[in-house]
Image (tube, rainbow, N blue to C red):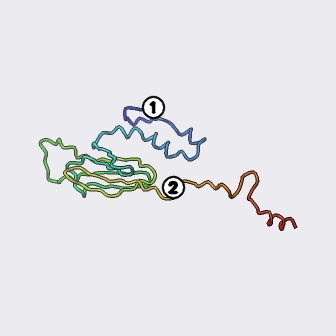
């Protein structure tokens, strides 16, 4: 198992044998196989929860403009990438600002949607909201007491039973 974030194929977790004997776990296996990417620490970011279903991802992108950044929302995946456009005529005596290209991926739970994004003072904020459809929310089921019994079936009035027997 690779824990240091390196990309050596020999050291990666090999989950492909599990694909043969499992169904519907593809997303979990992909998360595990891509785990080494989680060790990349640039650009720094915060994830905050501001309510039961509201989240905010804040990424430090000093030096990047709105035109340099791209936010993509795919099913269960938020991708933020940046490509700083350097002036062609710049000659640096010292280049210490971290404006290298980046791609940051965030795995999202089911039903999490991007509500909006803003760039202020070098911080890119992306608001996320979890919107669970009504049919997916837990609901209380009423228990009927006098409609039917599982052992005897539906109750039939005595008069109706005589008519059915005739």
Label 2 to label 1: alpha-carbon separation: 36 Å
Residue at screen point 28% across, 47% down: 59
x, y (%) of residue 6? Answer: 37, 35
What residue is rendered at 37% in x and 35% in y?
Answer: 5
Find numbered disc 1 in the image and state the secondary structure of the residue it sits on.
loop
Identify the residue position indicated by label 1 in the image.
1
Residue found farthest to the right: 166
Instruction: In the rendered structure, find residue 136 and report the number of the disc placed on it.
Output: 2
Dot 2 or dot 1: first in sequence order is: 1
Q: In front: 145, or 105?
A: 145
- Name the one closer to the observer, 69 or 91: 69
Marking on residue 152: none
* Residue ranking furthest to the front: 158
Which quarter shows the C terminus?
bottom right
Quadrant position of residue 127: bottom left
Asked which secondary structure carries label 2, the reply is helix
Q: In this view, does 6 lie above or below 163?
A: above
Question: Which quadrant of the rendered structure holds the N terminus?
Answer: top left
Q: In this view, does 43 lie above or below 87?
A: above
User: Badge 2, how many Cα within 10 Å: few under 14, some, many 20+?
Assistant: few
The answer to whether marks 2 and 1 mark residues whose Cβ atoms lie closer than 8 Å is: no
User: Where is residue 42 drawn, in percent x and y?
Assistant: 28, 42
Comparing 98 with 137, the one in front is: 137
Q: Position of residue 68 (x, y in %)?
A: 25, 55
Residue plotted at (37% across, 47% down): 105
- Check disc 1: other Cα within 10 Å, few if <14, some if 14-19, many if 20+: few
- Give coordinates of residue 74: x percent, y percent: 41, 55
Question: Who's the residue at 46% across and 51% down the image?
Answer: 110
- Tell me: 94 left or right of 149: left
Which mark lies nearer to you, 2 or 1?
2
Q: Nearer the viewer, residue 100 or 128?
A: 128
Left/right of residue 128 with respect to residue 13 in the rendered view: left
């Amino acid at each position: 198992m690779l824990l240091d974030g390196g990309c050596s194929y020999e050291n990666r977790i090999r989950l492909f044998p599990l694909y043969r004997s499992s169904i519907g776990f593809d997303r979990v296996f992909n998360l595990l196989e891509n785990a080494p990417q989680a060790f990349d620490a640039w650009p720094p970011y915060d994830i905050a929860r501001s309510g039961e279903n509201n989240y905010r991802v804040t990424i430090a992108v000093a030096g990047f403009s709105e035109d340099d950044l791209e936010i993509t929302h795919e099913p269960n995946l938020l991708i933020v990438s940046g490509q700083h456009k350097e002036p062609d005529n710049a000659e640096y005596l010292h280049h210490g600002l971290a404006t290298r290209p980046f791609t940051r991926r965030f795995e999202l739970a089911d039903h999490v949607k991007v509500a909006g994004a803003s760039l202020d003072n070098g911080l890119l904020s992306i608001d996320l909201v979890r919107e669970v459809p009504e049919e997916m929310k837990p609901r209380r089921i009423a228990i009927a007491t006098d409609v039917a019994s599982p052992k005897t079936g539906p109750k039939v009035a005595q008069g109706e039973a005589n008519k059915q027997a005739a």
